[in-house]
Image: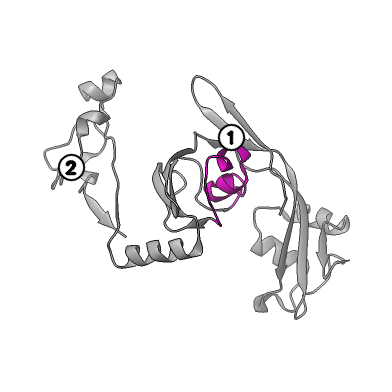
Amino acid sequence: MITRVQYIVTQTAERITRQVSPYVHVFTTFAKQRWLGKGILDVLSSEFGSYSIDYWKVAIQHGFIRINGITVSPEYKFQSNDKLIHKTHRHEATAFGEVQIIGQTDTLIAVNKPPSIPMQPSGSYRYNSLEYILLYDEALKLKIHDMESLHVVHRLDRVTSGLVILAKSKDAAAEISKNIRDKKMKKVYLARVKGCFGSNLSHLKALDSINFRSFDTDDSDMKRGREQRRPHEIKQVGKESY
């Protein structure tokens, strides 16, 4: 893990772009039981399919792939307790949108997560995940008070935007997780629909506590309902528990 992350945040009239400067990343893992006796090329190409077999051949040849700290040949077969080390120059995927700290207490923080940013490191996102942005973006860290550590207690999909709560300590995370298990906390999904509901819509359960006028849009097509997208697929809008 690198000690200092350089974020490049660009803002235009259309959107905010968040990039991470490329960095050297060292991935390590111990050989799995299913790897034993198999060739290193076969294992790498089947277990880590994001790279081609030609890449793995070059990486082994130049020592970017090592076993127990030692350079091996492409014919090497995994043995028990082998430690695989992969050193690479990593270029993370670009994320879009502004990460906003909505509020915080001594124990938790509420954040508005934009779409395109995953909650935690995943795939081609590591330092461009919400968890790591809050931990490593110096501008955002200055806005967070009295944080012992940071804990994700619930998740939204990468392409979903909305409010998320993160805990500032292990004790706070345990308490929030218990409240979720006991169904003392709920989350509500809202969807903006373009078009008109069809007559074959089964039912629509609106939330009385929400002022839907606040979701008005200036999009003339949406106001006039020119486009109608498969209304038979819309079954219900309502509360969803964890």
Looking at the image, which is closer to me, 123 or 113?
A: 113
The x and y percentages for residue 60 are 83, 59
The x and y percentages for residue 157 are 43, 49
Q: Is residue 119 magenta?
A: no
Relative height, residue 62 to residue 205 (above, below): below
Describe residue 97's horizontal placement relative to residue 183 as left or right: right
Q: Quadrant of residue 200?
A: top left
Kindly state the secondary structure of the residue where label 2 is placed. loop
Q: Which of marks 2 and 1 is in front?
A: 2
Report the Cα–Cα distance between label 2 and label 1: 35 Å
Residue 144 seen in the current view: yes
The x and y percentages for residue 62 are 88, 55
Q: Mark 2 points at which residue?
A: 209
Please name the amino acid that badge 1 sits on. Arg
Rendered-image quadrant of the N terminus:
bottom right
Looking at the image, which is closer to me, 189 or 40?
A: 189
Residue range in magenta is 122-149
The x and y percentages for residue 199 are 11, 38
